[in-house]
Image: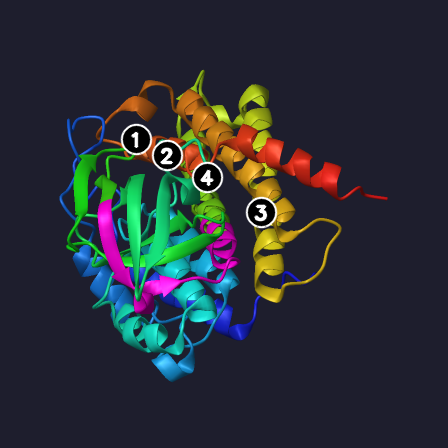
Amino acid sequence: MDFTFTEEQQAAVEAAKAVFSGVAPDSVPSPALTPGAVADDFDRALWRKLADADLLSLLIAPEHGGAGLDPIALCLVLRESAKVLARVPLLESGAAALTIQRYATEELCAEVLPGVGTGDLVVTVAAHGRTGHEPADLAVAGHQEGPEWVLDGVQTAVPWARTTDRILIPAHTPDGHAVLALVPRTHPGVTLDDQVPTSGEPHAEVRLDSVRISDRGMITDPAAWEWLRNVLTTGTCALALGIGARVLDMTSDYTSKREQFGYPVATFQAVACQTADRFIDLRAMEATLWQAAWRLTTEAAGPLPLAGDVAVAKIWASEGVRRVVQTAQHLHGGFGADTDYPLHRYHAWAKQLELSLGPAAAHEESLGELIAAHPLG
């Protein structure tokens, strides 16, 4: 295991920092003050800047116009995006691109990947199932009828589904295998109902009623869905790390300037101990994230399957980001809840990420099952 980033990965971080440096976390109305979504669409201007900086093509193979980098690079860019609460489907688009490139036919890759890299084709992913509490592939049934697949079911909380071009949707076949369907948003039989999560971003419930997709738009490799879910979960951990790092910086800055009894509150032992504990949380989130991303990228063997490292990373990300934002709110006092100050926005996003793709308890259960099936010793 080597956590030293390559020159290409470090260059991606620098490019991301340059693009995100001009993003304001409070560029849209506060989710605490908005009854519906904070905006109708993701940040299209930022999306174009990401495309112009070649950050959308970062993961795409050179034959399709990209740089051919890996999930570690995606996580590095996602971490930077979360520090400014960038309102773009970077995680979903990147995870979809990696999965299509790895498992789809050459025909589908040639059709989709160049447009994804230029930002002209935006892909999101349905990964939460019908209610968010069961495997997403079980929420949609798919079967073949001649040269077509027929899909029926519901996927909830699909990010920016109303304004992206295609949705990558997991489904299960009659024999229990998982498949992926790349469905156009405006395809006949697709119905979208507005949903608004804690973060205030526009999501949608996607209903599929006898949706017919040609073989060309299907990914039938049974390993594709598990790979996609692992990329999404690891990327979610990277977002949580970025939010946690930014919130701890905000807390350090505030407590070093806020005075009580003539002294900065950062000098008080109780405050120092709490921030030190949160620093430890961040270091654990960071170590477990890069372990999972490294396993995902290298396919290196380990005492547990890759899913075990991903579960550990998600447990730390869920619990860690929650503790960081709660401590930040506490140490900021009433100022932390002021809607003119951005901390409450980070709290809302952190809660969304904590529960996204399963809370810590769900991953603890999965980890226990993996340890039982693969005894360590």
Between 2 and 273, which is closer to the camera in this rendering? Answer: 2
Q: CA distance from mark 4 to mark 2?
A: 18 Å
Of circles 3 and 2, the one toward us is 3
Q: In the picture shown, does residue 244 fall above or below 179?
A: above
The single residue placed furthest to the bottom in the displayed view is: 63
Q: Please give the residue where the numbered disc 2 appears in the rendered image.
A: 352
Which residue is most to the front?
146
The local secondary structure at tag 4 comes to loop
In space, the residues marked 1 and 4 are separated at their CA atoms by: 21 Å
Q: Which residue is mark 3?
A: 310
Distance between the alpha carbons at the discs numbered 4 and 3: 16 Å
Circle 4 or circle 2, nearest the eye: 4
Q: Secondary structure at mark 2?
A: helix
Label 3: few (<14), some or many (≥20) within 10 Å? Answer: many
Which quarter of the picture shows residue 155? top left
Helix, strand or loop for disc 1: loop
Residue type indicated by callout 3 = Val
Q: Is residue 46 magenta?
A: no
The residue at the point 17 percent across, 37 percent down is: 193
Sequence-wise, which precedes: disc 4 or disc 3?
A: 4
- Which residue in the protein does label 4 denote? 135
- Given the image, on which type of amino acid does mark 1 rest? Thr
**Residues at marks 3 and 1, CA–CA distance in whole angstroms:** 24 Å
Q: Nearer the viewer, residue 166 or 79?
A: 166
Q: Which mark is residue 198?
A: 1
Segment colored magenta: 209-232
- Quadrant assignment, res 268: top right
Q: Are marks 3 and 2 in contact (CB under 8 Å)?
A: no
Q: Vertical placement of 375 versus 269: above or below?
A: below
Classed neighbour count for the residue bearing mark 4: other residues with Cα under 10 Å, few (<14), some (14–19), many (≥20): some
